[in-house]
Amino acid sequence: MANINDNYLKLKAGYLFPEIGRRVKAFAAAHPEAKIIRCGIGDVTEPLAPAVITAMHKAVDDMAKRETFRGYGDEQGCDFLKAAVAQHDYQARGCQIAADEVFISDGSKCDTGNILDILGHNNTIAMTDPVYPVYVDTNVMAGNTGPANEKGEFGGLVYLPTTAENNFTPALPTQRVDVVYLCYPNNPTGAVATREMLAKWVEYAKANDTLILYDAAYYAYITDPAIPHSIYEIPGGRDVAIEFRSYSKTAGFTGTRCAYTVVPKSVTGKAADGSRVDFHRLWNRRQTTKFNGVAYIVQRGAEAVYSPEGKQQVKATIDFYMGNAKIIRETLGALGLHVYGGVNAPYIWLKTPGGLKSWDFFDKLLREAHVVGTPGSGFGAAGEGYFRISAFNSRANVEEAMNRFRTRLRM
Amino acid sequence: MANINDNYLKLKAGYLFPEIGRRVKAFAAAHPEAKIIRCGIGDVTEPLAPAVITAMHKAVDDMAKRETFRGYGDEQGCDFLKAAVAQHDYQARGCQIAADEVFISDGSKCDTGNILDILGHNNTIAMTDPVYPVYVDTNVMAGNTGPANEKGEFGGLVYLPTTAENNFTPALPTQRVDVVYLCYPNNPTGAVATREMLAKWVEYAKANDTLILYDAAYYAYITDPAIPHSIYEIPGGRDVAIEFRSYSKTAGFTGTRCAYTVVPKSVTGKAADGSRVDFHRLWNRRQTTKFNGVAYIVQRGAEAVYSPEGKQQVKATIDFYMGNAKIIRETLGALGLHVYGGVNAPYIWLKTPGGLKSWDFFDKLLREAHVVGTPGSGFGAAGEGYFRISAFNSRANVEEAMNRFRTRLRM
């Protein structure tokens, strides 16, 4: 018999967002008259930038003629896009990142999961709590954890609680760890990392020979000029960190699929014989063997994000979403709720009123206001009692959702 | 320190195609006057079908307007494409495959590699030799093998030699195995599986509780109506097999990226406690956690392959490539070479003249004729002394390459 990967059986219920979808679908079926507003999943709502549309039309035409047709591209991505990333996203901000350290992919969800392929199974792994569920679940699947306890915490992982009590700034681990996941601006709390805080992490990583997996999917939402966009803005960052970024939230590519992962050649891990191996070589081998690159059409669309018009158009959309965030933050704050985030991130993180459990507040909000949010406990045990509202929505929906918070929610 | 996945260090040199690229690049640099013709990598050359182009332009326009914009799609793929696959590729041929057993992805290379995520590490795994290198390399990476011997065979894998001696029809394993990879029409040999042969495999799988991983990437090249396109055409096939298919070779999507994997709900594996778990559930969990779906634009392009015009256009291109295959097969045969395949597959597999080793013939062909092919030994130890020529090319290139075989190659 083919033996299955038994680690999958340790996973709890469904992945968070399918479970939300299930509950919403059931509610909608029972209440077909309800006009449900979705502020749950962090999915964009605004169309792609005109510059991206123009570039993709042109690329589709390239595929229609033998002279300009593109077959297999490099698994690492097209040179034009890797060069644009290195120049605009890194070198322009003083980061020493070369084009061949950039790996284009179809999503940060994929990359943050797949990165475990190149790591051994004997690492001590830390992550903040609450956290993007993919970090946890992919470690469970890879066999890097024991089973979960009743709070949903998996044995073997080092959880770093980030709550209002520590101002959403996790303390450095008290033990040494081999790998740590960091995500700033943070999903789900909306917190950001100051330069000083990131410098402490880099220092910790150097002192402890720790690999930092840095998820910067939301960097484009930073409004405070003092906040770093990349861990590579910190001296020494390129010796200790792999960084993940995506066009999903930057340029509305959730349904278009393009992202990238930066693996500086200076980041190394340890082989069983004690020798050092650079992760760039391993990730290159992983990607060339198990991946076949991103659609040419999509890469041309991503390239257009860096054109002068593209930059302007993409920024206008981000400003729009951040306008939504401001409305949500101020409305909920005025209602007496404790709200966090939403200033340098598109997520508002709130303490559930009356000490409700996260899923209870989810059900209550859906039932009373027909508004969907994301239960904080879905992001980890320390997220219990919190709730995430996403600013990705039309202005009309945000205003109507806030109206319902004011008038329909019994608090 | 972060420990690396030491299994990667067992891998031999580079993945086959990058190594070919390296040798060609070096030769081109040393002989800038040489007009190199590439018949090596199996990459398509003809533009996308007009129906696909039209559908993708329309889909790009959908992404430009809020009303028709698409954000995150289902990780399993869009309903319209899954339904088209189930109907046209399976139900129309009498296979009982439902739309929710189809998982759309960005490539069969990815899926055939990633499928190991849901399997345990204690399986006995068989594959033909020669074979698509991804099957081997991903098993090495996953830790399912020991190190390689001097012939490049990895300990722990069960190799099923397929050579001219057994008419490229591997014998059933003499031991029982848990998993077997089959690829028909075969890459690289161009051989096909008859209905009787596949029925024997299904019978073996039923008797031995074996999982068949069936790669049908080249099914569209089958010209003989008696040859099955899918393992699900065999009674019982849907109880034992997962099937991989791609639009890469069917519709020229190598640079557009769309494929699918069929996981029937009736295929199960064994958990450590002896219970049966269906692979559909596991693959669904893997894909929802580590993948985020294929670009909407690309899925609309793939859907157009099933329109009446799309079917006709795609078939015309396949007929064109098979015209190339005929020219290659007949020319090389007339030169006295032993040639195989090329009738129901776009690959011609030949015995190297004069008993040359595969890489020696590669170098000789490049040096004398400036033609690039693929060394058979790159596909496995039993491929040594063979060589693959791809029919994916312009007619002019095929004719010129054949002319050079006739006039420049010293045999």
Image: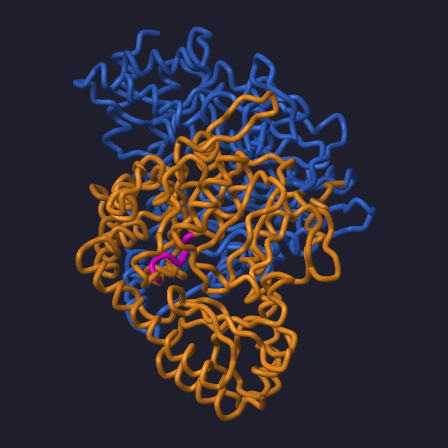
Chain colours: A orange, B blue
Residue at image position (42%, 10%) is B353
Which portion, as a residue range, is magenta? Answer: A216-221
Q: In terms of depth relative to the viewer, which is nearer, A166 or A75?
A: A166
Q: In terms of depth relative to the viewer, which is nearer, B370 or A174?
A: A174
Taking A401 as reference, is B59 above or below it?
Answer: above
Taking B247 as reference, is A373 above or below it?
Answer: below
Q: How many marks?
A: 0
Hey, which residue is sitting farthest right in the picture?
Answer: B274
Q: Is residue B29 visible?
A: yes
Q: In terms of depth relative to the viewer, which is nearer, A364 or B342?
A: A364
Q: In terms of depth relative to the viewer, which is nearer, A308 or B207?
A: A308
Q: Is residue A217 magenta?
A: yes
Q: Is residue B221 magenta?
A: no
Picture coordinates of residue B287 (x, y %)? 56, 53
Picture coordinates of residue A377 (x, y %)? 62, 66
In this rendering, would A218 be left or right of B153?
left
Q: Is residue B46 visible?
A: no
Image quadrant in which the N terminus of chain A is located: top right
Taking B24 as reference, is B259 above or below it?
Answer: below
Image quadrant in which the C terminus of chain A is located: bottom right
Residue at image position (23%, 59%) is A311
